[in-house]
């Protein structure tokens, strides 16, 4: 056995293998190359190519095709194709037929931070809402029961007479959500504003279940919060810089 193994290895290294043996060698190189990669798409493509070379070998090398081996390689290849389709559906916006506005809003906060498949998981069982009248979403000193994303429109921060206005896209109640604490301001969504409401329990469960969603959403929240503290999003109504009033960023204006 060892002698035959050594002979096969030598034939491969010296280039003296039979034509059909090169099918196995090509498959081996595809498998080895794929397993050395961390990119899921290239890994699966190389494994699929390896399975194709194996199928050719099992079909043409022996006098009678090895049908059991052909069946096994076919099953592996089919599973790989299903995995590739799943990855494509997760990564390509084309497959996000609904809630495209949510993906666009999150991309505006930080481009490429979240994938379409993660948006699909975020929005499962939920719909975009539109405020017909003012909607109080957080109250100072109270624990919000939901976490919000403004897609467009406005929300006043600090009460109906406040001149601090959050403009979408941005998160609302993200600080209370991350810290599991109370809201630091009253926030009221204005009529005509489109927004998404995630119940705290629901979004927490989804983040625990999907690690990639958890990482992406936390990164988006951090980026959005940093932008707010830098005075870029949201801007004060009628102001180009928060320094002109001295009232923003202040104490967690978006609760």
Image (cartoon, grey):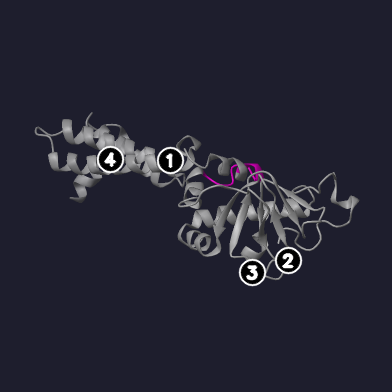
Q: Quadrant of the C terminus?
A: bottom right
Q: Earlier in the sequence, mark 3 or mark 1?
A: 1
Q: Which residues are magenta?
A: 107-115
Q: Is residue 255 above or below residue 8?
A: below
33 part of magenta stretch? no
Q: Secondary structure at mark 3?
A: loop
In the picture of the structure, the residue carrying the numbered disc 3 is 143
Mark 3–mark 4 distance (CA, rounded to whole Å):
49 Å
- Characterize the local packing of mark 2: few (<14), some (14-19) or many (20 or more) Cα atoms within 10 angstroms: many
Query: Percent position (x, y) of residue 243?
Result: 88, 52
Mark yes or no: residue 13 visible: no
Mark 3–mark 1 distance (CA, rounded to whole Å):
36 Å
Give the number of the mark in front: 3 or 4. Answer: 3
Mark yes or no: residue 105 visible: yes
Marking on residue 89: 1
Give the number of the mark in front: 3 or 1. Answer: 3
Q: Quadrant of residue 161?
A: bottom right
Q: Earlier in the sequence, mark 2 or mark 3?
A: 3
Q: Earlier in the sequence, mark 1 or mark 4?
A: 4
Marking on residue 184: 2
Mark 1–mark 2 distance (CA, rounded to whole Å):
39 Å
Mark 2–mark 3 distance (CA, rounded to whole Å):
9 Å
In the image, 40 versus 81, the foreground residue is 81
């Amino acid at each position: 056995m060892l002698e035959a193994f050594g002979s096969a290895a030598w034939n491969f290294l010296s280039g003296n293998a039979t034509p059909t043996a090169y099918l196995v060698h090509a498959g081996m190189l595809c498998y080895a190359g794929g397993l050395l990669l961390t990119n899921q798409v290239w890994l699966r493509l190389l494994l699929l190519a390896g399975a194709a070379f194996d199928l050719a070998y099992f079909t043409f090398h022996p006098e009678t095709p090895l049908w059991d081996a052909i069946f096994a390689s076919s099953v592996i290849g089919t599973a790989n194709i299903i995995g590739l389709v799943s990855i494509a559906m997760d990564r390509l916006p084309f497959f996000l037929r609904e809630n495209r506005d949510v993906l666009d809003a999150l991309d505006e906060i930080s481009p490429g931070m979240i994938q379409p498949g993660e948006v699909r998981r975020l929005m499962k069982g939920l719909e975009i809402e539109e405020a017909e009248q003012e909607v109080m979403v957080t109250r100072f000193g109270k624990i919000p029961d939901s976490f919000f994303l403004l897609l467009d429109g406005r929300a006043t921060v600090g009460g109906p007479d406040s001149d601090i206005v959050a403009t979408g896209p941005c998160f609302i109640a993200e600080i209370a959500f991350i810290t599991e604490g109370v809201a630091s301001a009253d926030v009221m969504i204005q009529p005509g504003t489109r927004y998404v409401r995630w119940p705290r329990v629901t979004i927490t469960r989804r983040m625990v279940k999907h690690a990639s969603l958890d990482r992406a959403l936390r990164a988006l929240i951090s980026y959005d919060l940093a932008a707010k503290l830098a005075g870029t999003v949201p801007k004060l109504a009628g102001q180009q810089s928060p320094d002109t009033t001295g009232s923003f960023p202040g104490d967690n204006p978006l609760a």
